[in-house]
């Protein structure tokens, strides 16, 4: 085989793999739904796993073979399957569990949306309104509450991966009150409060979200006496006064919505209050395959995007905020710190 033939065959294999990548995602989703990673400790064969997860043995064996191909599991010569670092991330109680992130990324609505990517690229517009007759998150909470719950859990898992790095990066020694805007179930806020015992906090998010806040923040929780749970939509207004406003991984809508949200914060906050935007940036990401795919999904569902550093800094300035600093916050995120100017 010539060098040209060899490279040509490699190109054919790669395109075929990419074309079938929905199958890889589906296999990972099935593993997460069946809780295969929770079904054994050291090793197990197909029959043992089939009994544990209530699956048909032959079909399960085919799924396991696909997972082995991608390094999610390994198989020994006796036909027994073993964990890898990847499979352990599919366990519900794992410290860095990504089970709900896997489920979120492969929810039924995602398969439907991906088929319209060509139209979104032609128009530069998402397709949620066309598919559902309403804005995406309205659809999610009104028509797909189970998927909304998966989203909340996925965001909490994501926060667990980054909350400590964010809390360690922020100097909040001179602050007295911090508000986490669209902070989900409040894991980041809880971590910040635990590391800064002088602080009071506010979790600001949609009513259905704050109703299911982290147990530490709700009545009876160890942080409840220092926290207020406030329901609202930051795109419509932010009726909270604080020293520090945190907006972590939420400014991924269309640019107008991003600027509107930042202006709502600037309008409510007092001059000199800090506004801290935390995002994983396209030009600072260590995992470009994931980030660029998320960028396209955001285009589809919320007319949104992942940002470059200059692009996001430009939107912060457009909202009338004064940018003070841009720096990393852990291995995946960047922090853009700004202040509300004098009026």
Image (cartoon, rainbow, N blue to C red):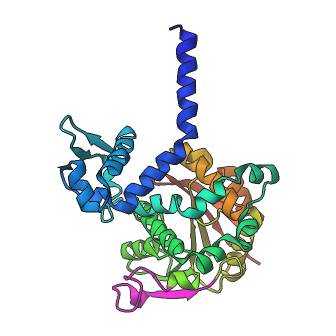
Q: Nearer the viewer, residue 170 or 305?
A: 305
Above/below status of 226 relative to 187: below
Q: Please tell me which residue is depicted at 50% across the width and 63% down the height of the picture.
A: 104
Above/below status of 150 relative to 279: below
Q: Position of residue 162 (x, y in %)?
A: 44, 61
Q: Please tell me which residue is depicted at 41% across the width and 56% down the height of the picture.
A: 30
**Residue 267 within the magenta-colored segment of the rendering:** no
| Quadrant containing the C terminus in the rendered view | bottom right
Q: Please tell me which residue is depicted at 51% across the width and 69% down the height of the picture.
A: 151
Q: Can you tell which quarter of the image residue 164 is in?
A: bottom left
Please, what is the dominant secondary structure of the magenta stretch? Answer: loop
**Residue 227 within the magenta-colored segment of the rendering:** yes
Q: Nearer the viewer, residue 296 or 341?
A: 296
Above/below status of 80 relative to 13: below
Q: Position of residue 50 (x, y in %)?
A: 27, 56
Give the farthest residue toward the top.
2
Q: Can you tell which quarter of the image residue 93 is in?
A: bottom left
Q: Position of residue 279 (x, y in %)?
A: 57, 59
Question: In the rendered view, does 309 fall on the left or right side of 56?
Answer: right
In the image, which residues are magenta?
211-232
* Residue 62 showing in the rendered view: yes
Question: In the rendered view, does 311 fall on the left or right side of 62?
Answer: right
């Amino acid at each position: 085989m010539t060098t040209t033939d060899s490279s040509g065959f490699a190109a054919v294999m790669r395109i075929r793999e990419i074309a079938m990548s929905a199958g890889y995602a589906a296999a990972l989703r099935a593993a997460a739904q069946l809780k295969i990673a929770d079904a054994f400790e050291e090793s197990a064969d197909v029959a043992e796993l089939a009994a544990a997860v209530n699956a048909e043995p032959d079909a399960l064996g085919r799924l396991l073979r696909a997972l082995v191909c991608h390094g999610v599991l390994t198989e020994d010569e006796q036909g027994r399957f073993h964990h890898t670092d990847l499979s352990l991330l599919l366990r519900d109680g794992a410290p860095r569990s990504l089970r709900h992130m896997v489920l979120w990324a492969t929810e039924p609505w995602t398969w439907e949306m991906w088929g319209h990517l060509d139209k979104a690229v032609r128009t530069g517009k998402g397709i949620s309104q066309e598919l559902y007759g309403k804005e995406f998150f309205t659809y999610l909470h009104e028509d797909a509450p189970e998927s909304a719950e998966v989203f909340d859990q996925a965001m909490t898992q994501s926060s667990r991966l980054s909350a400590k790095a964010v809390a360690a990066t922020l100097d909040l020694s001179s602050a007295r009150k911090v508000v986490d805007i669209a902070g989900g179930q409040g894991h980041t806020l809880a971590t910040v409060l635990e590391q800064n015992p002088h602080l009071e906090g506010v979790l600001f998010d949609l009513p259905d979200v704050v109703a299911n806040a982290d147990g530490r923040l709700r009545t009876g929780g160890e942080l409840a006496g220092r926290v207020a749970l406030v329901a609202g939509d930051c795109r419509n207004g932010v009726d909270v006064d604080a020293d520090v406003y945190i907006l972590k991984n939420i400014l991924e809508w269309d640019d107008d919505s991003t600027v509107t949200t930042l202006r709502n914060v600037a309008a409510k906050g007092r001059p000199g209050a800090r506004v801290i935007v935390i995002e994983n940036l396209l030009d600072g990401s260590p995992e470009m395959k994931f980030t660029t795919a998320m960028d396209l999904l955001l285009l589809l569902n919320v007319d949104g995007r992942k940002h470059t550093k200059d692009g996001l800094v430009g939107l912060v300035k457009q909202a009338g905020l004064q940018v003070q600093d841009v720096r990393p916050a852990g291995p995946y995120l960047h922090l853009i710190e700004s202040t509300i100017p004098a009026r």
